[in-house]
């Protein structure tokens, strides 16, 4: 069979990696796909650099629309990133009857419903393994490997930058700002790290996984997004003493509130038991833990970023598309795992309705009755205490830290208990609240 | 679309689980597959029990051939196990133009080449996710998720019984026989545990994975198969002191010997660094670590056995087949990941040609010159020492244990060094040899 023809929009880090791996492993890939996969054109802002990068072997164009409109090209690989231009290019490629592969989680988390509907109408595929957890085939696992299951929940370390920062903070006892600076120097964090450290990137990925896991539309605007920039080194230490590690998790979970089904979709720093495998995922690595009703817990671990790990996912999609390019749409895996006419719209719960456990730290006057007041507030709110850690005041100090770990409760109850605690004259400043998941 | 019709050969543990999950999640599964998947008949030796198990909802027959020859049935699920009858049934099902799903690793590791060739010739699919690592979608990951990669090696904890025994031996300091007895009482080990504890089951699974990873035929007869029944509790303790855990690994690895490509295919107890994620896979859980040239290391973890975890894999295969049942064979994923006309036949290396590191323990007279003799033997064989552990003799004892960890070397060199060590008058009994993999 003649080669399938690919155009790359962008030939930077991931685009360059995709080009390299397709060339290096072309024989291996052809033996699997049954057909050669050939990059015939790339678009790039810097034409000279792109020509050098691709060794003069393919056409290099400045305008990505020239790739999208090139009738010779079967599959467009979108690696530009961002929202507006990427959306326009992807929709145009679909309109032109081309299949699309994208690593762009932001695009799919925000414009995914529109894009998948357009692809469905046109009978083309939009594949996006590279958009979540880099080289780990988690989209394939969720969408195809676990089809027997009602997925109960998933929880993932899906942002390498923040996991690197948290690992360093714990290992070296350093504070957030210091480690962020080091991470930027090492290239693990970008010059503007906002998307990573504030949890936006993880929330994009969690949004995509929630859709696939539960058969709901992507709804990024309803995700709870909370990063690690306000995380205090002291809480990492206290958590460790209590047998927990703090990770930035992206969580998607089925829930029932007052008998009504809902979905929790949230990204935030989370205490998890140190002995869990996922608690030991260190540095820039990614892992996703998925709980299905038949299979139980399964975990997927690997590199969540980088040129060739991401290229690995892009090319896996290219091979899948190559196999199914001429198949009837019914033979293909639905974009969001469920048939388009079989999606549901279970509501994403507001954070106040979420049920989880909590780590609460407060600084208190070391005097009789303080603990009684605090535990009374928790009891009145119907919150039971799972563990408590009270530090001795340092020499000459009259104040100390108290930490409570609670059993499961709704966030709104915890928030109102915190407000009451903060109103006590014995409690100084604000109460630190970090969510806790046992993941079992 | 009308339902796809399934016949189960065997309705015991996994068959019953498959029946239950298909029924419980039928709505969820139909929403994914686009078509209902319906069990219409089962075969069982005990008809009454099978009727009770299936609630009288399906036809129950005594002769599995009646399922295989039933023109109404589209997919036959073989859950009988064993070699001869299973082979006959699967080949007959294929001949009758039916797709097959099987959880039978023994069958595929031994008769896979014949079965896949027959399926290919007939244009039907034989799917076997459940044959390796239960509910973990490792076949899908290797066969589809990592298609961009040249797979360098994979190493898996792929037998839950032995991993449970090893975890217990380490946790409780007990010896093999005691823990095996407990495992049998708890139902983690069978009455005749030979296949599990002697590594045969793991070797079946490693054989299947080696074929998919490298595009070679299944060659179980060439696998090195070594179990844990001779493993001594003292070696687990020494390994721990040296920073390692002992796991029964199934390993498939590309190698080069004298410039010629080969494949290592081996199952044996293995020291691995305690800090590796896979070293912390405990109890009856399974995990497979895969090293690809583009993606790096990825790990897949979950339950490797049990009714519903295995059913999860069986049903994922049913959904895949349902999607592709009427597609042209070229749209399907090749049985062994590579197109049938693009398989290679890289030789499986004999164990003497394998290169790895070693843990060597010997009991020696505590007298001058012994260490010099031993290290001289290793040096003469070109084997470098990575670490050494020498225990003080117990009070009143004149003998002690010495442990060497070696750098990488070929097994034949280690074997000849061991023969020389055992010939020393200062070395008592035989030298214990356990292989060591850094998995990095």
Image (spheres, coloured by chain):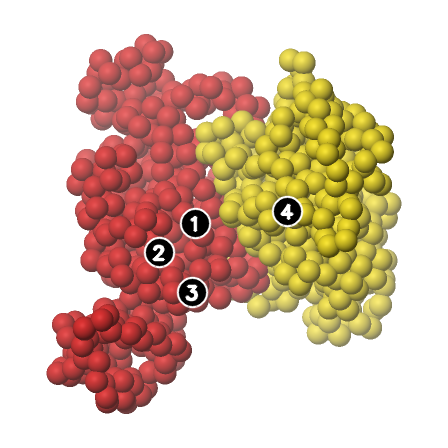
Chain colours: A yellow, B red
Q: Nearer the viewer, mark 4 or mark 3?
A: 4
Disc 4/disc 3 C-alpha distance (Å): 25 Å
Q: Which mark is residue B243?
A: 3
Q: Tell me if label 1 and label 2 are in contact, CB under 8 Å.
A: yes
Q: Which mark is residue B281?
A: 1
Q: Which mark is residue A239?
A: 4
Who's the residue at 22% across and 13% down the image? B48
Disc 1/disc 4 C-alpha distance (Å): 23 Å
Spot occupied by residue A381 in the image (x, y as percentages of width and height): 72, 21
Q: Tell me if label 4 and label 3 are in contact, CB under 8 Å.
A: no
Does residue A51 appear in the picture of this structure? yes
For the view shown, which residue lies furthest in the top direction?
B56
Crowding around mark 1 (Cα neighbors within 10 Å: few <14, some 14 to 19, many 20+) is: many
* Location of mark 2 (residue): B247
Spot occupied by residue A420 in the image (x, y as percentages of width and height): 81, 27
Relative vertical location of residue B403 with respect to residue B298 in this rendering, above or below: below
Disc 1/disc 2 C-alpha distance (Å): 9 Å
Spot occupied by residue A140 in the image (x, y as percentages of width and height): 56, 42
Q: Chain of mark 4?
A: A
Q: Chain of mark 2?
A: B
């Amino acid at each position: 069979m003649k080669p399938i023809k690919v155009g790359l929009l962008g030939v930077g880090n991931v685009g360059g990696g995709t080009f390299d791996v397709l060339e290096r492993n072309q024989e291996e890939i052809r033996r699997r796909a049954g057909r050669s996969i050939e990059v015939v054109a790339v678009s790039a802002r810097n034409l000279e650099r792109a020509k050098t990068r691709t060794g003069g072997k393919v056409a290099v164009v400045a305008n990505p629309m020239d790739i999208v409109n090139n009738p010779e090209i079967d599959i467009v690989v979108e690696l530009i990133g961002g929202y507006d231009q990427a959306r326009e290019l992807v929709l145009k490629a679909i309109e032109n009857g081309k299949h699309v592969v994208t690593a762009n989680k932001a695009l799919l988390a925000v414009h995914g419903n529109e894009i998948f509907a357009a692809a469905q109408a046109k009978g083309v595929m939009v594949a996006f393994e590279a958009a979540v957890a880099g080289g780990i085939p988690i989209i394939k696992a969720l969408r195809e490997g676990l089809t027997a299951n009602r997925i109960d929940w998933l929880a993932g370390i899906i942002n390498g930058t923040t996991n690197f920062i948290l690992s360093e903070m714990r290992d070296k006892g350093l504070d957030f700002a210091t480690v962020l600076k080091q991470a930027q120097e090492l290239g693990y964090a970008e010059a503007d790290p906002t998307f990573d450290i504030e949890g936006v990137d993880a929330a994009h990925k969690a949004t995509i996984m929630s859709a696939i896991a539960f058969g709901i539309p992507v709804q990024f605007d309803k995700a709870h997004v909370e990063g690690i920039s306000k995380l205090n080194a002291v809480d990492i230490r206290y958590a460790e003493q209590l047998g927990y590690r703090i990770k930035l998790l992206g969580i998607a979970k089925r829930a029932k509130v007052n008998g009504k089904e809902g979905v929790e979709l949230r990204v935030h720093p989370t205490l998890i038991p140190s002995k869990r495998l996922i608690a030991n995922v260190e540095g820039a690595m990614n892992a996703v833990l998925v709980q299905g009703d038949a299979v139980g817990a399964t975990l997927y671990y690997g590199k969540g970023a980088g040129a060739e790990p991401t290229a690995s996912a892009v090319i896996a999609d290219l091979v899948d598309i190559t196999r199914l390019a001429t198949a009837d749409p019914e033979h293909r895996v639905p974009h969001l795992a469920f048939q388009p006419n079989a999606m549901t719209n279970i509501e994403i719960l507001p954070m106040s309705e979420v049920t989880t456990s909590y780590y609460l730290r407060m600084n208190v006057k070391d005097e009789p009755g303080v603990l009684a007041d605090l535990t009374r507030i928790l009891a009145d709110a119907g919150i039971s205490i799972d563990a408590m850690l009270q530090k001795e005041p340092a020499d000459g100090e009259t104040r100390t830290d108290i930490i409570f770990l609670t059993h499961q409760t709704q966030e709104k109850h915890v928030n109102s208990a915190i407000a009451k605690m903060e109103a006590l004259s014995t409690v100084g400043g604000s109460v630190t609240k970090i969510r806790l998941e046992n993941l079992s």
